[in-house]
Amino acid sequence: MSGEEKADRLKKILSEYDVNAVVVKDIEAAVVSGQIMICPINLSHGFILRDIRYAVLTDKELSGVHRKTRKKRKSGQLIKSFNELSVGDFIVHEAHGIGKYVGIDQLVVDAQKKRLYENLIFW
Protein backbone atom coordinates (compact mmCIF):
# COMPACT_ATOMS: atom_id res chain seq x y z
CA MET A 1 0.00 0.00 0.00
CA SER A 2 1.43 3.37 -1.00
CA GLY A 3 1.89 6.28 1.37
CA GLU A 4 -0.98 8.17 -0.23
CA GLU A 5 -3.29 5.16 0.13
CA LYS A 6 -2.32 4.80 3.81
CA ALA A 7 -2.98 8.52 4.35
CA ASP A 8 -6.43 8.32 2.75
CA ARG A 9 -7.25 5.20 4.76
CA LEU A 10 -6.23 6.90 8.03
CA LYS A 11 -8.34 9.95 7.15
CA LYS A 12 -11.34 7.68 6.55
CA ILE A 13 -10.84 5.85 9.87
CA LEU A 14 -10.55 9.14 11.75
CA SER A 15 -13.70 10.50 10.09
CA GLU A 16 -15.62 7.43 11.32
CA TYR A 17 -14.83 8.71 14.83
CA ASP A 18 -15.84 12.28 13.91
CA VAL A 19 -12.20 13.41 13.89
CA ASN A 20 -11.47 15.84 11.08
CA ALA A 21 -8.12 15.48 9.36
CA VAL A 22 -6.64 16.76 6.14
CA VAL A 23 -4.23 14.92 3.85
CA VAL A 24 -1.40 17.14 2.64
CA LYS A 25 1.04 16.15 -0.07
CA ASP A 26 3.72 18.66 0.90
CA ILE A 27 5.50 18.55 4.26
CA GLU A 28 5.85 22.32 4.12
CA ALA A 29 2.09 22.90 4.12
CA ALA A 30 0.90 25.58 6.51
CA VAL A 31 0.20 24.21 9.97
CA VAL A 32 -3.12 25.28 11.47
CA SER A 33 -3.48 25.13 15.25
CA GLY A 34 -5.66 22.22 16.35
CA GLN A 35 -5.71 20.63 12.91
CA ILE A 36 -4.73 17.03 12.26
CA MET A 37 -2.59 16.80 9.15
CA ILE A 38 -1.72 13.52 7.46
CA CYS A 39 1.36 13.67 5.29
CA PRO A 40 2.55 10.54 3.46
CA ILE A 41 6.31 10.78 4.00
CA ASN A 42 8.83 8.27 5.33
CA LEU A 43 10.01 8.87 8.89
CA SER A 44 11.65 6.35 11.18
CA HIS A 45 10.37 8.02 14.37
CA GLY A 46 8.01 10.78 15.30
CA PHE A 47 8.63 13.59 17.77
CA ILE A 48 6.80 15.95 20.12
CA LEU A 49 7.49 19.64 20.68
CA ARG A 50 5.66 20.18 23.96
CA ASP A 51 6.35 23.93 24.20
CA ILE A 52 4.31 24.64 21.08
CA ARG A 53 1.99 21.61 21.45
CA TYR A 54 3.07 20.02 18.16
CA ALA A 55 3.40 16.29 17.54
CA VAL A 56 4.50 14.24 14.55
CA LEU A 57 3.69 10.53 14.68
CA THR A 58 4.61 7.79 12.24
CA ASP A 59 2.18 5.18 10.98
CA LYS A 60 4.09 2.58 13.02
CA GLU A 61 3.59 4.61 16.19
CA LEU A 62 -0.12 5.04 15.48
CA SER A 63 -0.78 1.40 14.64
CA GLY A 64 1.63 -0.19 17.09
CA VAL A 65 3.01 -2.34 14.26
CA HIS A 66 6.76 -2.33 13.86
CA ARG A 67 8.23 -4.27 11.00
CA LYS A 68 11.75 -5.48 11.59
CA THR A 69 14.16 -4.38 8.95
CA ARG A 70 17.04 -6.60 8.09
CA LYS A 71 20.40 -5.02 8.45
CA LYS A 72 22.57 -5.18 5.42
CA ARG A 73 25.50 -7.43 6.01
CA LYS A 74 28.73 -5.55 5.93
CA SER A 75 31.52 -6.98 3.90
CA GLY A 76 33.27 -9.58 5.96
CA GLN A 77 34.33 -13.14 5.78
CA LEU A 78 31.70 -15.72 6.62
CA ILE A 79 32.86 -19.01 8.07
CA LYS A 80 31.28 -22.42 7.57
CA SER A 81 32.93 -24.11 10.52
CA PHE A 82 34.77 -23.28 13.72
CA ASN A 83 37.69 -25.19 12.21
CA GLU A 84 38.39 -22.06 10.17
CA LEU A 85 39.11 -20.09 13.37
CA SER A 86 42.33 -19.88 15.30
CA VAL A 87 42.51 -19.28 19.04
CA GLY A 88 42.52 -15.53 19.61
CA ASP A 89 40.59 -14.63 16.44
CA PHE A 90 38.08 -11.85 16.87
CA ILE A 91 34.59 -12.54 15.58
CA VAL A 92 31.41 -10.58 14.97
CA HIS A 93 28.16 -12.40 15.71
CA GLU A 94 24.94 -11.02 14.25
CA ALA A 95 23.03 -11.25 17.55
CA HIS A 96 25.77 -11.15 20.20
CA GLY A 97 28.19 -8.59 18.78
CA ILE A 98 31.97 -8.68 19.02
CA GLY A 99 33.66 -11.67 20.57
CA LYS A 100 36.86 -13.65 20.71
CA TYR A 101 37.34 -17.33 19.90
CA VAL A 102 39.19 -19.02 22.76
CA GLY A 103 39.14 -22.62 21.57
CA ILE A 104 37.15 -25.82 21.82
CA ASP A 105 36.34 -27.33 25.21
CA GLN A 106 34.96 -30.72 26.11
CA LEU A 107 31.86 -31.01 28.24
CA VAL A 108 32.29 -33.64 30.97
CA VAL A 109 29.22 -34.96 32.81
CA ASP A 110 29.48 -37.68 35.47
CA ALA A 111 33.09 -38.33 34.47
CA GLN A 112 32.06 -39.01 30.87
CA LYS A 113 33.10 -36.87 27.94
CA LYS A 114 29.88 -35.78 26.31
CA ARG A 115 30.70 -33.47 23.42
CA LEU A 116 32.90 -30.68 22.17
CA TYR A 117 31.69 -27.13 22.20
CA GLU A 118 33.08 -23.88 20.90
CA ASN A 119 34.23 -21.47 23.55
CA LEU A 120 33.56 -17.82 22.71
CA ILE A 121 33.81 -14.71 24.84
CA PHE A 122 31.54 -11.75 24.00
CA TRP A 123 31.80 -8.21 25.29
Image: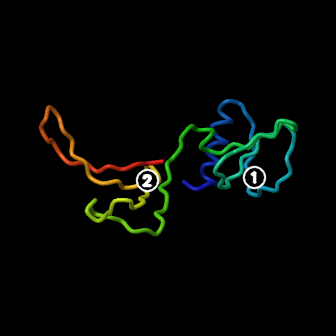
Q: Are marks 2 and 1 in contact (CB under 8 Å)?
A: no
Question: Nearer the viewer's eye, disc 2 or disc 1?
Answer: 2
- Name the element at disc 2: strand
Q: Which residue is mark 1?
A: 24
Query: Measured from the top left, where is residue 63 in percent x and y?
Result: 58, 38
In this view, the residue in front, 4 or 120, is 120
Q: Is residue 47 left or right of residue 52?
A: left
Q: Quadrant of residue 94?
A: bottom left
Q: Is residue 36 left or right of residue 51?
A: left
Q: Quadrant of residue 91?
A: bottom left
Q: Is residue 10 left or right of residue 84?
A: right
Q: Quadrant of residue 42?
A: bottom right
In this view, the residue in front, 34 or 85, is 85
Question: Looking at the image, which residue sits at the far left?
Answer: 112
In this view, the residue in front, 94 or 65, is 94
Image disc number at residue 99: 2
The Cα–Cα distance between marks 2 and 1, rounded to whole angstroms, is: 49 Å
Three-letter amino acid code at the position of disc 1: Val
